[in-house]
């Protein structure tokens, strides 16, 4: 397991302690983490192991049958969500990269989860807008290009059942959300998105310092 935490406020030692005192990555997950690490710096796009454990637990707790993921990368988050699905549950993954998702496919197969996961390659907004505008999903996870976060969020929320949950990654953006010297497009997008969700009367929200920050938004009845 990589010793480098995604949480910018955690030391490597404290991160290791945190993971070891939860449900740690099993051998399949550890191998996926290791293979992703070989990609170099881009591997930072993978969610943290403690975040994966949280997502599996949350998926089980709210008894998710239908889930959707925007941004799959090498498939770790999809693996974690699929493990928590009900026996007849299904996860729809949206991504643009055949190269990265092909890694995930191998691990989904190894874990016996391939029949629960549908991968659609192409722009996620196109995929979302092709779906019925009806509340069919119990859980959504957004972890893709930051400037499209508001669009993904709106499309997903329309298709989320009442009391369903949206998870949004990277909302602390390595602490740059509060850095007055950070003025790049992605940082501005994250700040604006966070402000928008915090004032959205369609949802109840909490922002957690998990990984690089994750917002949980529950769609109100």
Image: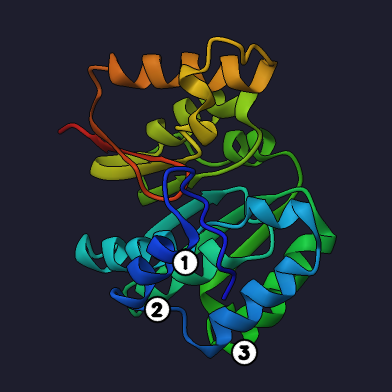
Q: Which residue does the image show at 68% across and 71% down from the upper left?
A: 104
Does residue 210 sit above or below 18 in this rendering? above
Q: Which residue does the image show at 73% across and 63% down from the upper left?
A: 101
Taking the image as shown, residue 23 lies to the left or right of residue 48, namely left
Does residue 96 sit above or below 162 in this rendering? below
Furthest-right residue in this view: 99
Q: Which residue does the image show at 24% across and 65% down from the upper left?
A: 63
Closest to the camera, between mark 3 and mark 1, is: 1
The answer to whether residue 44 is seen in the rendering is yes
- The residue that mark 3 highlights is 110
- Kind of element beneath mark 2: loop
Q: Give the x, y percent position of residue 199.
A: 28, 14
Q: Give the x, y percent position of residue 78.
A: 53, 64
Measured in 3D between alpha carbons, the distance from the residue under mark 3 to the one under mark 1, in whole angstroms, is: 19 Å
Crowding at mark 3 (Cα within 10 Å: few <14, some 14-19, many 20+): few
Q: Are marks 2 and 3 in contact (CB under 8 Å)?
A: no
The answer to whether residue 135 is seen in the rendering is no
Closest to the camera, between mark 2 and mark 3, is: 2
Foreground pick, 214 / 81: 214
- The residue that mark 1 highlights is 49
- The residue that mark 2 highlights is 24
Mark 2 or mark 3, earlier in chain:
2
- Kind of element beneath mark 3: helix
Mark 1 or mark 2, earlier in chain:
2
Foreground pick, 118 / 42: 42
Crowding at mark 1 (Cα within 10 Å: few <14, some 14-19, many 20+): many
Q: Are marks 1 and 2 in contact (CB under 8 Å)?
A: yes
Measured in 3D between alpha carbons, the distance from the residue under mark 2 to the one under mark 3, in whole angstroms, is: 18 Å
Foreground pick, 176 / 89: 176
């Amino acid at each position: 397991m990589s010793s480098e935490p995604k949480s910018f406020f955690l030391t490597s030692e404290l991160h290791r302690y945190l993971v070891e005192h939860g449900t740690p990555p099993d051998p399949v997950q550890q191998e996926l983490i290791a293979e992703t690490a070989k990609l170099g710096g881009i591997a930072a796009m993978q969610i943290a192991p403690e975040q994966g454990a949280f997502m599996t637990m949350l998926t089980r707790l709210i008894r998710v049958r239908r889930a959707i993921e925007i941004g799959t990368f090498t498939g770790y988050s999809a693996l974690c969500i699929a493990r928590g699905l009900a026996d007849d549950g299904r996860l729809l993954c949206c991504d643009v990269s055949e190269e990265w998702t092909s890694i995930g496919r191998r691990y989904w197969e190894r874990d016996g989860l391939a029949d629960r996961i549908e991968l659609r390659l192409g722009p996620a907004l196109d995929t979302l807008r092709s779906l019925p505008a009806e509340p069919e999903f119990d859980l959504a996870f957004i972890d893709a290009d930051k400037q499209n976060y508001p669009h993904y969020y709106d499309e997903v929320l329309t298709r989320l059942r009442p009391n369903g949950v949206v998870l949004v990654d990277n909302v602390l953006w390595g602490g740059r959300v509060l850095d007055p010297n950070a003025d790049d497009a992605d940082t501005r997008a994250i700040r604006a998105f966070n402000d928008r969700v915090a004032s959205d009367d369609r949802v109840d929200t909490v922002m957690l310092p998990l990984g690089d920050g994750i917002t949980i938004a529950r769609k109100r009845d």
